Image (cartoon, rainbow, N blue to C red):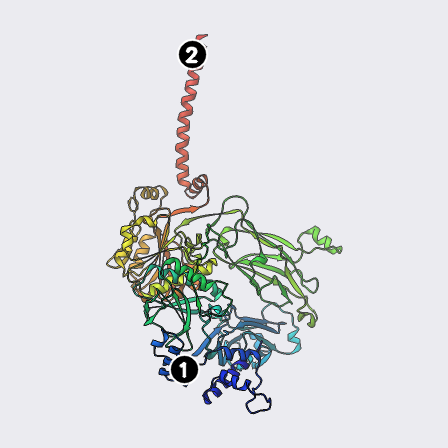
Amino acid sequence: MVNRAFVSFALTCITFCALAEDLDYRNLHNNMSKATDPDAENAAPHLPKVIEDILLQSRPLDDGQTAEQNETDAADKGDEILSKLNTHDDSLNAYSSSYTFDKLGFRDGVKMAAGQDESNIGFTLPIDKMVSSARLEIYVQQTEAMAQRHPHLKVKLNEQELGTIPLTSKDLTSYELTVPTEYLSEDNSLVFQVVDDKEFSCLIDYSDKYLIKVDPKSHLDIDGYILSLDPNLSVFPLPFLDSYENDKTTVNFVLPQPLTPEVVQGAVMLASYFGIKAEYRGVGFNTSLDTLPVGNSIIFGHPKQTVAGIELPDKAGVYMKDNPFYKPYKNVYVVASSEEDFINAILALTGSEKNEETNFLPIKSYPKEIHQPYDAPYWISANRKVYLHELLRKDQSLLTRGFFHAPLDIAFRSAPDLYQIYGSPSDLFISYEFPPDYLDEEASGLDVSISGNYLDKLPVNKKGLLENLWRLLGGNGRENERHIPLQPTYVYGDNELRFFFDTRLKRGTACDVMRDTNIKSVIDEKSYIDLSNSVHFARMPNLAFFVGASFPFTRYADFSHTAILLPDHATVSELDTLFNLMARSGNATGTMVSADKVYLGSQILNEDQAVFRGLDLMVVATLKHREYLQRLLEGSSFELNSGDLNIVEYGMFSLKGGLLSSLERFLTGDFRSENADANRYVRTNSAWRGFLSLISPFDRDNVAVVVTATSDDELSRLGDDLDNREINKSVTGDLSVISGQDKVMSYNVGDYIYQGEVSTAFKVLFFAGKHAAWLCVVGFFVLVIFSIIASRCLRKRAQKRLMVAAGK
């Protein structure tokens, strides 16, 4: 791979030279290629082929042209849209980003203990950016014993030394290093090496007495410029989303006014695609209504419709063109007439068959994929054993090298409503192997945890008297496999299995052994996780399911049993929130949202309620849409009074929700003790955002989730809230209110139902198990009735026997 900095340096030099001579590189190359004498003045200087390809395929920025010349050039090319616009901004656009170690996946920072002389961080940089400057700021802390040794910390980037820092203080201290841009590339390795005496580098100590920690808030700051690329749909999702980018990306969507359901459907589908591609990085959206923002933008509309001052082509399809106002940015135009055409346009844009360079994709029909419940490709199967190697990313393996290494984290997703009915817990089977020599076998082990819950420490050797005797006689006493029971509460939406080979060396182990990376600790490929003894069953509504996996909407990954509702004149904050939720859904399931039904405005709520039967409802609307929300909240524990949300206090004999619901609450002793507290909290907070969930007002077998806030400003903060792991953990029940920076209050205030794939007999037993008092009452009455019946039968039998005896 050609070094990024060398490419950047060559691009910079050639660009400025070409501007000085009023030539772009392609003209320069053509003139040079005509030279027959290699020693002539105009003979072409040698450049690496990759640089020539970039320069020859990229479009010059026309820095020397006027706006009128740009318009003339566009008209000469037959581009009727861009020729109408004043392309006055030709300047290169600055780029800057800050990568904290936390964002790079090192949430605990970097730790180096005695005997561990170095540790490294891997990261990537976006490929469509030119870096002009970079600096590294690290925050280092050490123990008091370590500080007394006065160590030095050497920092290297891609095998090139950035500097050596003397560590003198035990307190958290900041150090700044300049990073030469020629050291950077697409894939990078940042190495921290402890420089001390040889005795320390060979010291074996596991007490953390000698410890250096680089804080996760340490960061690498990058400044540079955005490169201008030719309009090319074959590289999509570039330039909107770069797989080499480590930071969260924001995508610009431009929608026409007034909104139509098919346009929103197209944007919803594409938002879910970006969620899939963003993976762990995250993606957000900046929606504009009939306004073109600065940056790369995706514009949705109908043929010949004018959106943000741009008349769309009269032929349906997907186009990529230069942004007419802000170079070097690009616009993608998704032009279609119907919901089906928008879906097919997005499928064309995101499909894998875009092999040739093109700036236009026609719309064609695609076969419709029918999804079944719980078939999301990202969700682990609950019907079979799933081997751990199936869950690995491409850059992961089930082995670790050497004696000092990071934990192995295996992330996987599951349906959040898994429930265990009968038999033993779910099974995690681990087959593993430790190195044969040098280990302190009693202290070493394999630590296993799931989603922060510690499960077990698997030993190196088998335990027991006979095993110890066998090992003393020279037999093999190694433990190499173990079944670990998994409680169903541990497997929940987003999960992370963590394996850490705690390999502790014997005292006096040679120093070269400590550095030997040829030694491996291995988890065998026959290791698996088995959830096949669980079923899908849960109490709904449950907002924890929603924020974790967009459930229950993702029960069908394509949202084929979901209706998305937006109020009249939806604001950009409401649209941004909707698209953020769609991206989270795509990220959770690996499937684009393509079969949902989008409804705009309140008219449909009053005219044709039958369309909502059998559908779960996702509603995004702030509290200012009072009448709209009031219709959706009818019969629930939520009410709107003068634009404020109130929580109904049921009491013991309330008929709210109907007679059957009231009777059920009375029989189960569910008197909603949290409602008064919830109502008090909501009414005394003037600014908040959050979630309401309730049984659908149109079908009591389905659920509605209302994403709302007191204002658009509050609603716009919800996307960042959902990126916060601590906030996500706190969202539960059927009402969650987020106020201030990160304060979350959750309550259970409304009616609920049970959904799942279980028999009626199990539902009866489940109810009995939840309400033991009523089980006793029912059992008592059953016993009384049985006693009465048995008494009458016995009395009749006795009378009959006496009559027979008297007759004799």
Give the residue displayed 62% in from the left and 72% down from the top.
116
Q: Quadrant of residue 397?
A: bottom right
Residue 753 visible in image: yes
* Residue type for callout 1: Ser
Please name the residue that numbered disc 1 is placed on: 91
Per the image, the residue denoted by label 2 is: 803
Q: Dot 2 lies on which element?
A: helix
* Mark 1 surroundings: few (<14), some (14-19) or many (≥20) residues within 10 A: few
Quadrant in the picture for residue 767: top left
- Residue at 40%, 81% (x, y): give it: 90
Identify the amino acid type marked 2: Met
Q: Nearer the viewer, residue 671 or 158?
A: 158
Q: Which of pointers 1 and 2 lies earlier in the amino acid sequence?
A: 1
Front tag of 1 and 2? 1
As drawn, the residue found furthest toward the top would be 808
Describe the element under mark 1 as helix, strand or loop.
loop
Horizontal relation, residue 529 to residue 347: left or right: right
**Image position, residue 16 (x, y; %):** 47, 87
Q: Where is residue 503 drawn, in percent x and y?
A: 64, 64
